[in-house]
Amino acid sequence: MAKRTLTGTSLDTLVSLAKRRGFVFQSSEIYGGLSSVWDYGPVGVELKRNVKDAWWKSMVRERDDIVGIDASILMHPDVWVASGHLAGFSDPLVECNECHRRYREDQLEGEVCPNCGGDFGPSRQFNLLLKTFLGPVEDDAATVYLRPETAQAMFVNFENVQTTSRKKIPFGIAQIGKSFRNEITPGNFTFRTREFEQMEMEFFCEPGTDDEWHEYWMKFSMDWFKKFGIRGEKLMLRVHEADELPHYSKASADVEYEFPWGWGELETISNRTDFDLKAHTAKSGKDLSYFDDQKKERYVPFVVEPAMGADRSALAFLADAYDEEGEGKEMRVVLRFHPDIAPFQVAVLPLSKKDTLSPTARRVYDVLRQNFNTQYDGTQSIGRRYRRQDEIGTPLCVTVDFDTLDDDAVTIRNRDTMEQIRVPIENLEAAIRDQMNAMRIDCQG
Ligand code: GAP
């Protein structure tokens, strides 16, 4: 099957495709937009949901040793004192003496302002926590923070979750949710934003087994991206140098993807040791140790954390799926998503708008939508409709034509091969499953 050598494209082309086909729009666009804040449209919301569902299924539903939670974005302010975020969650900031633009110092290339060539003033640390006030009084006592990571809810709920789920160590707690950081220089579309979604899992293990679990979760993470279609040669695992480790980490590694502008982080897998549980015990006075009833001993578990960005991963899936075939007017743009990641799995297309085909096409649609995320598209020429489905990466199109009225059969067109096969409607679901299974194997990176 001719696949896997994908052409890729520039970020500008991806941004324009994303807007044109309903993946991502700029937030508050009719007011001129809000810088670096994005909204997912009807196609993009399905893509991101599929990424999150694939992660949740692999992490929680398919495993016995991980359970999920869904915690609040707002937490007690002492959480961020204990975690170290209030004192130390900052990036180095410099300001140009001429145009007063501000930059993250560690991301600058060169000594002068990229905007005007001016000199920079002294570097200072800028705290990335976003704050707001809880209740009707706006003073220090009412200040709360929008969480900068979902992880802390897993630590402060450690005992609640462990006792109610009756899990024994080693076990993990997973969560998907919004996080906020007042980034100095957001950018590269949805890659670095101030509001974003994370998929994080805290894996609690016995001290001394943590290095082994770190290895395990690094491999798991790389394999997960490949399983859902990211090409292996576009991924790398980059181990952190000692001087770039987060304050809580003994060892960290990033899964990086080669985006159109270069390599960028999708996920960090860290060995957080017993830093967080001990810090919350010290601040709250609540003992967060664990009694191992087989070993008959009490210890504070170590934590290994795979922390992934949902938006960055969705962007990587989009960038990696992009392919162009042919040239000029004949050029076909096709997103070769894995079938579990594709926003829609099937499109039902009646060949003509004529009323004679609609009842059968709607009947097919109603059956398929029970089991597959299916779109119905009855307008424009069939060629334009195929092109549209290719551009949003729908693996299979089912065409209902005038012969269908006689033979009760339809045509399935495969996105990648463009091969068309005729199948009786009664065998359609099985035929779709077969083709999607073949595509799943074909898509593995
Ligand atoms: N709990 C650990 C933690 O939050 P992190 O490396 O700072 O680790 C994890 O974040 C992941 O969250 C990143 O690998 C990235 O995918 C995503 N992420 C972090 N900051 C982001 C931002 N400003 N915009 C979009 N995604 C972001």
Image (cartoon, rainbow, N blue to C red):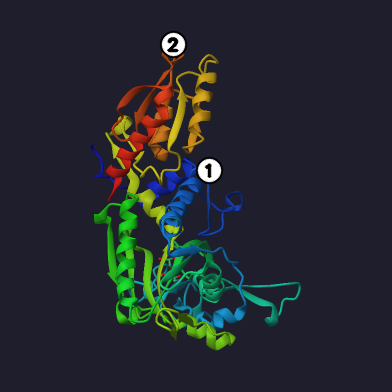
Q: Where is residue 151 in the image (x, y as percent from the top left)?
A: 49, 71
Q: How far is the residue under mark 1 from the one under mark 2?
A: 35 Å
Nearer the observer, 205 or 102: 205
Residue 74, above or below 228: below
Q: In which quarter of the image is residue 422?
A: top left
Residue at (37, 27) in percent of width and height:
412
Residue 123, above or below 3: below
Residue at (54, 64) in percent of width and height:
69
Tell me if residue 259 can be seen.
no
Nearer the observer, 95 or 406: 406
Split into quadrants, the picture shows ligand 1 in the one at bottom left
User: Can you tell which mark lies on residue 42?
Assistant: 1
Which amino acid does the dot numbered 2 rest on? Asp
Closer to us: mark 1 or mark 2? 2
Q: Is mark 1 within 8 Å of ligand 1?
A: no
Q: Is mark 1 on a helix, strand or loop?
A: loop
Residue 352, above or below 305: above
Q: Which of marks 1 and 2 is nearer the N terminus?
A: 1
User: Can you tell which mark lies on residue 117?
Assistant: none
